[in-house]
Each structure stands twice: as structure tokens, then as C-alpha cells.
Amino acid sequence: MNISAFMATSLDGFIARKDGSLDWLDHANALVPKGEDCGYSEFIEDIDVIVMGSRTFGKVLSFPEWPYGKRRLIVLSSKSLEIPKHLKGTVSCSRETPEALAKRLKAEGAKNIYVDGGLTFQSFLKAGLVHEFTVTIIPVLLGDGIRLFGGIPEDISLDLLSEKHYGFGFVQLRYAIQKPKQ
């Protein structure tokens, strides 16, 4: 089973403003040529299950269209969560730890899991469950906000798998997490 992430961040490492706003990303996306998705369609094509936190889920619900089709999505939340009627067949809620959820999804046959949202990504990363991630760096400095990586208790060594530069200023880096040497 492979657990990965696909995120955008400001050059100074923020994924959102302190209040969760993505206005800066909306402005940056206005620079992207029509039809360009910076590899997202290719990334999501093989994803079996998406896992995100409740704040990210709330943000996604505010989008004009549901972006995940019929793909299974699990929202991690310690609180009761209202799932919109039209999503009840594909969206569920879980209070499991990242470790317990990963174990269950593996037992259910999931092959490729996408973790989305800052806290969810950080919790899976800290648990040693993330195999790789793609980060697209947007040419803007926010100065403050919600960090992509947060506090990490120890060094995490990475292997650069690919890099891509876009003519509109985005830089995309794909990394694999190095396995600890035994």
C-alpha cells in the first residue's frame, strides 16, 4: 500500500492563511493556463481512497463542484460530522488514528491512499506512514499561516524523485520518504 500527498505551498511553506483561507492560491491559479492541472489528474487517477481532516473537508464542500467523483473519501474527525446526502455513498467519517486507519485500509485492499490537509498530512508523516509526496511551490510569500510540515520530532530524509518548472512560476517537487536504515 502506498500513502502519498499532493499539496501546494507558498514559497515560505504555508498551505493556508491562519484562518484557513486559500485566497492566495485562487489568485495564483488564475495564472495557470486553461487545461493545465500541474499533474493532479495523473496523480489522482490511481488513488483508491482519500483521507482528510474535517477542516479540509469543510473547505472542499465550499467548492463549486465536488472534485473527487465517486472516489471513496474518509474524513478524520473526533467530532460528529454531517455528511451531505449526495455524498453518503462515498464519504464516511472515522475517529481512528492514522496507524489504525492505514492498517484497516490495507486489510480492505486499498492500494493507493491520498492524504490531504495540513494536520492530516502531518499526522500521517509523523506516524511514518507517508511514502511520497508532491509539493507545488507557488511564487508568493505569505509570512504567516498554516504550515505544510508543522513540527517534526526528528529528521526525515527524502529522495528527490522528480522536479518540474512551470512557465507561470510554479515549481513542483516530488519526494520519496527514505526508509530508516536497519
Image (cartoon, helix red, strand yellow):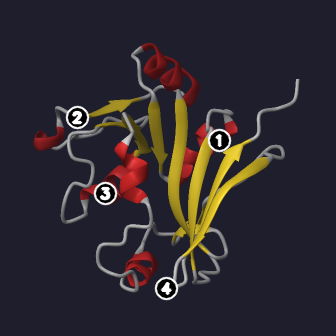
Farthest residue, direction right: 182
The correct choice, above or below, for 113 with respect to 104 in the image is below
Asked whether the beta carbons under mark 3 and mark 1 sit within 8 Å of each other, the answer is: no
**Element under label 1?**
helix
Crowd band around label 3 with a 10 angstrom C-alpha radius: few (<14), some (14–19), many (20+):
some
Q: Amino acid at mark 4?
A: Phe
Q: Which residue is mark 4?
A: 168
Q: Position of residue 155 (x, y in %)?
A: 83, 47
Q: Amino acid at mark 2?
A: Thr
Quadrant of the rendered image containing residue 51: top left
Q: Which residue is mark 1?
A: 125
Q: Whole-Å distance between the Cαs marked 1 and 4?
A: 30 Å
| Disc marking residue 60 | 3
Q: Earlier in the sequence, mark 3 or mark 1?
A: 3
Q: Whole-Å distance between the Cαs marked 1 and 2?
A: 25 Å
Residue 59 visible within the image? yes
| Disc marking residue 88 | none
Q: Earlier in the sequence, mark 3 or mark 4?
A: 3
Q: Position of residue 157 (x, y in %)?
A: 80, 46
